Each structure stands twice: as structure tokens, then as C-alpha cells.
Image (cartoon, rainbow, N blue to C red):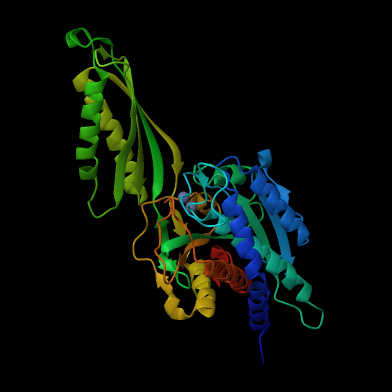
Amino acid sequence: MQTQLGRCAELIDSQVAQLEQELSELRRYLHAHPEPSGEEVETTRLVFGRLEEVGLDPHICRGGLGLIADLDIGDPPADAPRIALRADLDALRLIDEKEVPYASQNQGIAHACGHDAHTAIVYGAAKAAAQLQKSSTADQPLPGARLRFIFQPAEETCEGAKSLVEQGVLKGVDVILGLHLDPERQAGDIGVRDGVLTASCDEVDFRIQGKGGHAARPHHSIGPIAAGAQLVNALYQFVPRSVDSRDPAVFTIGKIAGGYAPNVIPEGLELWGTLRTIGRETRARIIQRIREIAHGVSEASGVNITVEFRNPLGSVDNDPRINQWLSQAAAEVLGPSHVKTIEKPSMGSEDFGVYLEHVPGSMYRLGCAPADGPSHFLHSPKFDIDERALGLGTRIFLRTALLISENYQPAGEAAES
Ligand SMILES: [Zn+2]
Ligand SMILES: [Zn+2]
């Protein structure tokens, strides 16, 4: 006899199959009308309207940026976990170079990170779940699940998740699931990884204060440019040698600003960089070394150097228990051989990690490379996807949520039982 869960999974598949055209149209509309981080007002409004149409009661977040909606399906017990599905709404400041009917109509802004697809997938999960709810009858009740759909702004600037968590979007949430498109995998494959998936990220600002003067008489000045050059050299030489070379860490200076003219030694110079690490100890050690090296250069050159670490963002650290349910659900949708283990974490970063500081969860990588065509990397001007990923991502999300709902016990209780 078919189990309730099996019946529900089949219903999900048939609901999502009927939605595939709509998900493609929504994704293409978003792709043609991208908004950059912190300006996703129209995208928020559009998703709000769509969620209202399917009978949800969404709530728009501060500044009209981002929204959330809850939906209970079946008849979940009062202690059933609430499971959040997260999408991000923002696009990048980049020129879309594709020649397709759905290319960006907003000059200089493009959905080159696939957040348009993430939004379509979580919307698809909301609509399919709302239709599923109608299939739950007294004679044939569906297994209960309590869901929250989170559409966040400003992922690319690492501000959106932090802002939404401050606004309380995780209140009552027990588990959170996220995904990111992966153009290095074919549509029909996914990648999962227990533990660290992405690096932590720290922005580093250096302000060098010297004493300006005539370029021909440097002995009257304390030159910030010579000190800055020494600083870059010293950081690049000594930071990698400060930690075990088997522990991944990357430090890059991406911007330098200062000076007015070839014959003027300026008063100051500013440098900006980014530090990516895997592992708390490596991160702490390098932060300390950067401060020490800056201090050393300051002593040697006579300038004053201040170092400020900004916008710290932790790793995405996936919960292995949740990954098991995710892998099981994905294997049912894709076939077990299409659920691949990600061997090494990425040195990129993702603000999904902010949610995981509060609740357990998991993010997986959803293949979106077309079987036949060239695949362009994330953040590249010709990035595009195989839209089969939309329906697959939606089914995996909903099936995982149902499995978690059936089996979840908070970590403490599971350990005691
Ligand atoms: Zn991105
Ligand atoms: Zn992204």
C-alpha cells in the first residue's frame, strides 16, 4: 500500500510538472528586469502579488525589500518543525551580453548569479505547496509540514540575510534550506557537502596616513605610497606563510586609492582587500597576522596605518543530518548517481551562512549547465541556464521539507533518544 509520504511525493511531482512553463516565464521576466542589491523593490512587489494570487499572506520586509510567507500543509502537530526555504532576489551590476529575448532590459544590471532562478524555484515551491494543501482531505490527509518562504534582498553585498534575521524572519524556524545554481554541473545533477561549503569572508580596509610634500624632496615627507607598496608585498609574502599551507586561505588587495599628481607626495593612501578562509582558527590567526604586519610596516616607514575588518561573514556550514534527508529526496527525483559529493569547499562566500548561525540547515548546488551548449561561469556576462533545473530544484526542496517534517527531532532530543 502506498504510504502517505509516497502519495504526497507523487502529488508534488505532478503539481510541479504543471508549473514548469510558469516557472520558466517567471524566471525569464525576472531575468529581463533585474534589480541590483538593496534596490529589489519591484521584484519584491512582483513576488508579493504572485504569492497572494496563490492564496498566501506574504509580509514585506523593511524598506519594501524582500518578503516572507508561511504555509502549513496537511495537519501538522503543534511541535512539527517549521522549515524555511530561502531565495535571493538581487542581480549584479554587470552588462548582460546574451542575445536572447529575455536579456536584461536594465542597462548595466544582470542576473548573472542565477538569483532569478532561485526566486522562481522558491515561488514554485510555494505555489505547489498551496495546491498540495487543497489535496489534503479528511479521508486522505497529507503528512503535515510547516513551511516558510523567505525571499531576501542583497545577497551579493552580504547584507540581506543579516537584515532579515534582525527583522525576525527566523522566529519560529527550526530548519532552513537553500540552493545555489551551479553552471559547472549539468542540469539533472546536484552537489552536496557536509560541513563547510563556502569560505568565510572579511573585508579589510587599510588607511595609511603619512606626511605630504614635494616629490623632489621626499626627505621632507613621510611617503604613504612607498609604505603602501611595502605593505602589499609584506602581506602577500607573510600571510600565506602564517598558517598551515593545507588550510585554505586567500588574501587579496583589490583596490588602492591615493595621490593627486606625479610630482606630489600625498598625505595618505587607502587599500581595500578581502580575506577568505576555511576554519575559525585559520581566520583568527590571519586576522592577527595582518594587524601585526601592518604595525611592522608602520614602524619601519614612519606612517600611521589603521586596519579595519568589516562585514564579517561566516562559512556556510551544512548540517549532516539535514544533508541526509536532502540527498535522499534528491536521489528520488534525480537518481542516486546524480547526487554528487562536493569534495572541496568553495573559497567564494554566501550570506546563507548568516541563517546557519541561528538554525541548522543546508545549502546544495543545483546543476544548470545545458547538456549541449557552452556553460558560462557565475558572474560572467553571458551566464545562462538550462531551465530544467527550475522544476528539479522545486521538487527537491519540497520533498526534502516533507522528509524533514516526518523525521526531524531537535539535536538535543535526538541525542538522548
Ligand atoms: Zn553572486
Ligand atoms: Zn549567488
The quarter of the rendered structure image containing the N terminus is bottom right
Q: For residue 198, which quarter of the picture?
A: bottom left
- Whether residue 88 is visible to the viewer of this picture, yes or no, is no
Residue 278 in the image, given as x and y percentages of width and height: 35, 52
Is 364 located above or below residue 167 in the figure?
Answer: below
Q: For residue 378, which quarter of the picture?
A: bottom left
Is 347 located above or below residue 62 in the figure?
Answer: below
Which residue of the protein is positioned furthest toward the right in this rendering?
Answer: 138
Left or right: where does residue 227 sit relative to residue 10? left
Is 142 located above or below residue 114 in the figure?
Answer: below
Left or right: where does residue 124 sit relative to residue 231? right
Question: Residue at (60%, 46%) from the top-left corner?
Answer: 165
Residue 159 in the image, given as x and y percentages of width and height: 53, 41
Q: For residue 182, which quarter of the picture?
A: bottom left
Q: How many marks?
A: 0
- Whether residue 299 is visible to the viewer of this picture, yes or no, is yes
Residue 170 in the image, given as x and y percentages of width and height: 63, 52
Q: Relative to the observer, which residue lies in front, 44 or 321?
A: 44
Question: Residue at (65%, 81%) from the top-left corner?
Answer: 10
Which residue of the protein is positioned furthest toward the bottom in this rendering?
Answer: 1
The quarter of the rendered structure image containing the C terminus is bottom right
Residue 52 in the image, given as x and y percentages of width and height: 76, 56
Q: Relative to the observer, which residue lies in front, 347 or 239?
A: 347
